C-alpha cells in the first residue's frame, strides 16, 4: 500500500508479486494465491490514490485497513473454493478483520518511517498522468 500511494500502481503491483511469491513459499501455500491478492490490492489502491488526497495519516490508515480486508477476503475466498471444509466466515472474523485493524493502527508510524527513508513523493496527480 505504501508503494501504491508513493510510487503508483505499477510499483505496487511489482511489490505485490515479490511479496506474494515470498509469502506463498514461506507459508507453503499454492504459488500464486498471495500474488493475486496483493497485485489486485496494489492496483486498486494505486488507482484510487491518484484520485484522492493521500497526505493525511487517516487516509493512509484507511487505505491500509481496506486493502488488508480486501486481501484477506480474496485469499479466504480462494482457500474456501479449494477447500470448503475450512469454512468462510470464521477465518474472516477471527483472522482477517483483527489483523487488518491492528495493521491500520500501526500504519501512521510505519509510513512515517518509510517516508523518512524514501522521501515524500514530489509529483502530483497531473504529473503522474503525464508520465
Image (spheres, rainbow, N blue to C red):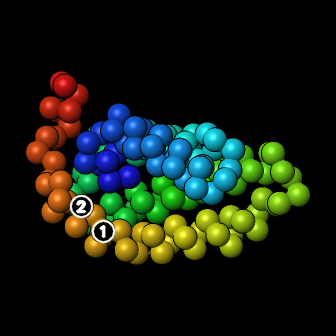
Q: Determine which residue is flagged by label 2.
A: 114
Q: Is residue 28 above or below residue 92?
A: above
Furthest residue in direction right, as rendered: 85
- Numbered tag placed on residue 110 in the rendering: 1
Provide residue 18's location: percent of width, then percent of height. Answer: 45, 43
Provide residue 100's location: percent of width, then percent of height. Answer: 52, 67
Q: In what element is the residue under mark 2?
A: helix
Q: Are marks 2 and 1 in contact (CB under 8 Å)?
A: yes
Seen at 32% across and 53% down, the residue is: 2
Provide residue 106's location: percent of width, then percent of height. Answer: 37, 74
Seen at 76% across and 63% down, the residue is: 89
Provide residue 43's location: percent of width, then percent of height. Answer: 43, 38
Q: Residues within 10 Å of mark 2 (few under 14, many from 20)?
A: some
Closer to the camera, 84 or 49?
Answer: 84
Asked whether residue 48 appears in the rendered view, the answer is no
74 relative to 118 in the view: left or right: right
Q: Residues within 10 Å of mark 1 (few under 14, many from 20)?
A: some
Q: Is residue 105 above or below residue 74?
A: below
**The image quarter in which residue 4 lies:** top left
Q: Is residue 85 above or below residue 3?
A: below
64 relative to 84 in the view: left or right: left
112 relative to 33 in the view: left or right: left
**The image quarter in which residue 129 lies:** top left
Asked whether residue 107 appears in the rendered view, the answer is yes
Amino acid at each position: 500500500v505504501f508503494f501504491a500511494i508513493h510510487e503508483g500502481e505499477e510499483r505496487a503491483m511489482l511489490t505485490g508479486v515479490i511479496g506474494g511469491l515470498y509469502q506463498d513459499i514461506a507459508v507453503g501455500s499454492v504459488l500464486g494465491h498471495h500474488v493475486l491478492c496483493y497485485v489486485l490490492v496494489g492496483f486498486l489502491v494505486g488507482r484510487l490514490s491518484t484520485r484522492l488526497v493521500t497526505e493525511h495519516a487517516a487516509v493512509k490508515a484507511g487505505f491500509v485497513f481496506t486493502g488488508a480486508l480486501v486481501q484477506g477476503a480474496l485469499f479466504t475466498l480462494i482457500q474456501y473454493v479449494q477447500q470448503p471444509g475450512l469454512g468462510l466466515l470464521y477465518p474472516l472474523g477471527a483472522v482477517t478483520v483483527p489483523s487488518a485493524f491492528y495493521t491500520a493502527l500501526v500504519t501512521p508510524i510505519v509510513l512515517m518511517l518509510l517516508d523518512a527513508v524514501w522521501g515524500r513523493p514530489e509529483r502530483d496527480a497531473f504529473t503522474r498522468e503525464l508520465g
